[in-house]
Image (cartoon, rainbow, N blue to C red):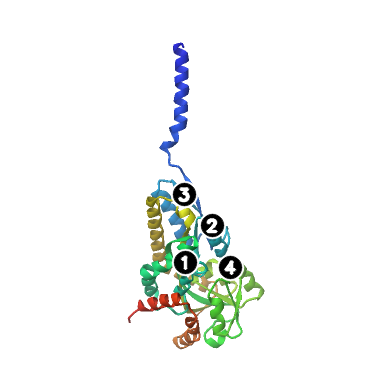
């Protein structure tokens, strides 16, 4: 074998070796999907984007979570179903939807259950919130964090709700998975179950007279243009949950799981810090657009609270234990 031929063979072997080992200098990139409703401008989705960005940075680009908003991957219910089977890797969803898989979660969003934001945070950040979140595990979902979802109020097309009597004969839209379909009739109104993407059309065509939501979602979804009467009744303080498919979760190493959990907690903290300003911006936008913002006085609020007390009596034993734990953490003043 002459010298020239040996050089050619050596060069060929070197190229083959580089081709086999050249990828070791670059991380193996794994892609995952995150589903969430509302637009990319919605504060909870900004937090989801921060979560995805932080995970990418913390893993040096090895784990890249691609978010999809505006129900691009399906409604909350369908996205969660896909998540259970690993079709979607992460989902940000209201507790009301996740409660279909873990009924204890429903005990965290009962009407008039909380006395303040601080009361809610004590529950979510403490043992009660973590214990309830863990109940998702048996259903194929791994809970990562709670996102604050503010308080829910009513909005209507014809007039503001200022008393319990105003609820009589109103048709109010709600999701089929929501506990509100049992609560709304207790106030004298009719609950009309609808998928989230049909509420706007139902308002426009007069199929419903109103619905209930948080103030930022009311503006972000464009409902304020169709139902310009908003009533500050604060009938429930809510949270969303960020969950992972347990099937996906088990593919991460312990170190990666720790990173993802930390990023989820930081994103949730950021979102909570910015929620109040998001509510103020939404209120100003709605009022400047001609919406009427009414306040339910304490006398009427007490009538609303009294009317829904029977729902507490029909809880399961496990749910009643959660409610008792929540009440034990109520504001003392």
Circles 2 and 1: CB distance less than 8 Å?
no
Instruction: Categorize mark 4 by other alpha carbons within 10 Å: few (<14), some (14-19), many (20+).
Output: some
- Mark 1 highlights which residue? 240
> Which circle's residue, 3 or 2, is located before the other in the chain?
3
Mark in the foreground, 3 or 2: 2
- Mark 3 highlights which residue? 64
Q: Secondary structure at mark 2?
A: loop
Give the CA distance from mark 1 to mark 4: 15 Å
Q: Percent position (x, y) of residue 130?
A: 39, 66
- Mark 4 highlights which residue? 196
Q: Secondary structure at mark 3?
A: strand
Circles 2 and 4: CB distance less than 8 Å?
no
Q: Percent position (x, y) of residue 20?
A: 46, 32
Q: Quadrant of the C terminus?
A: bottom left
> Which circle's residue, 2 or 1, is located before the other in the chain?
2
- Mark 2 highlights which residue? 85
* Placement of 26 over or under 19, stated as above or below: below
Give the CA distance from mark 2 to mark 4: 23 Å
Depth order, front residue of 106/186: 106
Residue at 57% x, 70% y is 223
Give the CA distance from mark 4 to mark 3: 29 Å
Mark in the foreground, 2 or 1: 2
Residue at 65% x, 75% y is 207
Q: Percent position (x, y) of residue 122?
A: 36, 71
Circles 3 and 1: CB distance less than 8 Å?
no
Give the CA distance from mark 2 to mark 1: 21 Å
């Amino acid at each position: 074998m002459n010298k020239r031929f040996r050089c050619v063979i050596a060069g060929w072997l070197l190229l083959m070796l580089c081709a086999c080992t050249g990828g070791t200098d670059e991380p193996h990139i794994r892609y995952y999907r995150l589903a969430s409703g509302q637009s990319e401008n919605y504060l909870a989705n900004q937090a989801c984007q921060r979560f995805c960005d932080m995970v990418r940075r913390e893993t040096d680009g090895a784990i890249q979570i691609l978010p999809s908003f505006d129900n691009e991957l399906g409604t909350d219910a369908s996205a969660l179903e896909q998540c259970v089977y690993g079709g979607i890797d992460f989902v940000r969803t209201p507790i009301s939807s996740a409660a279909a898989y873990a009924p204890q979660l429903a005990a965290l969003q009962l009407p008039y259950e909380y006395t303040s934001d601080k009361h809610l945070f004590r529950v979510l950040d403490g043992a009660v919130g973590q214990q309830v979140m863990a109940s998702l595990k048996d259903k194929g979902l791994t809970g990562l964090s709670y996102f604050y979802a503010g308080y829910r109020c009513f909005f209507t097309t014809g007039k503001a709700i200022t008393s319990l009597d105003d609820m009589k004969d109103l048709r109010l839209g709600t999701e089929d998975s929501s506990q509100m379909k049992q609560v709304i009739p207790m106030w004298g109104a009719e609950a009309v179950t609808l998928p989230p993407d049909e509420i706007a059309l139902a308002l426009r065509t007069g199929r419903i007279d109103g619905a209930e939501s948080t103030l930022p979602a009311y503006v972000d979804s464009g409902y304020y243009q169709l139902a310009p009467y908003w009533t500050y009744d604060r009938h429930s303080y809510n949270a969303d949950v960020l969950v992972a498919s347990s099937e996906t979760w088990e593919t991460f190493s312990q170190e990666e799981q720790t990173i993802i959990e930390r990023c989820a907690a930081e994103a949730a903290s950021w979102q909570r810090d910015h929620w109040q300003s998001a509510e103020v911006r939404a209120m100003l936008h709605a009022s400047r657009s001609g919406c009427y913002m009414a306040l339910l006085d304490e006398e009427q609020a007490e009538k609303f609270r009294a009317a829904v007390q029977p729902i507490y009596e029909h809880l399961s034993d496990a749910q009643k234990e959660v409610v008792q734990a929540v009440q034990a953490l109520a504001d003392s003043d």
